[in-house]
Image (tube, grey):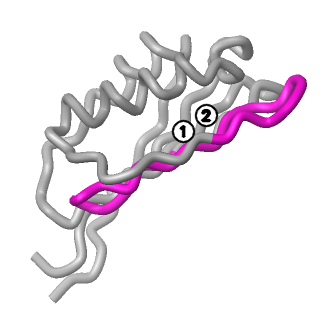
Amino acid sequence: MQGGIEWLVDGHGCAPARLRDRTAVTALLDAIVTVMGLRVVQAAVHAFPGEGGITAMYLLAESHLTIHTFPETGTATLNAYCCIPRTPAPWRELLGAHLGATEVRTTEHLRGGG
């Protein structure tokens, strides 16, 4: 395969406190890494001050995994890109367990082609 597979995942109805919690957000990313059999090369996590959310990126040997959280709307947006075929993570279950998401929307895109 040239290119890869990209998943866009939106979690709605999340618990605002969890969307501000660095530990909860990184636990979600760590669970995705484990379930999908990915390898983290480097991680960057930024917690915005006050009532702000979290932005995090895991640079993967297989590409990348990112999340942006929005406590003010109870929303988390994730992007997972893998250049090696993978079975997708159980997005609904993981976002529900870690962030309290009540609704999860996922789209999968084949990238690159050829």
- What is the chief secondary structure element of the magenta stretch? strand
> How far from the left and from the top, in percent, is residue 56?
56, 43
In the rendered image, which residue does mark 2 sit on?
Answer: 76
**Which quadrant holds the N terminus?**
bottom left
Give the camera-side residue of 52 and 8: 52
Amino acid on which the number 1 mark rests in the picture: Asp
The x and y percentages for residue 64 are 37, 57
The residue at 14%/39% (across/down) is 37
Q: Position of residue 55 (x, y in %)?
A: 64, 43
Which span of residues is magenta-colored? 46-66
- Residue identifier under label 1: 10
Q: Is residue 73 left or right of residue 104?
A: right
Answer with left or right where residue 95 lies relative to residue 101.
Answer: left
Quadrant assignment, res 108: bottom left
Nearest to the observer: residue 6 or residue 46: 46
For badge 2, the amino acid type reads Ala
Q: Quadrant of the C terminus?
A: bottom left
Which residue corresponds to the image point at 50% horizontal and 44% vertical from the top-left? 78
Q: Residue furthest bottom?
A: 114
Residue 52 seen by the camera: yes
Residue 21: which quarter of the image? top right
77 in relation to 83, above or below: above
Whether residue 89 is situated above or below residue 79 in the rendered picture: above
Q: Which mark is residue 87?
A: none
Q: Residue at x 47, y 42 (%)?
A: 9
Give percent across and percent down for residue 40.
29, 47
Q: Nearer the viewer, mark 2 or mark 1?
A: 2
Q: Is residue 97 left or right of residue 63?
A: right
Indicate the secondary structure of the residue bearing disc 2: strand
Query: Do callouts 2 and 1 mark residues in contact (Cβ within 8 Å)?
Result: yes
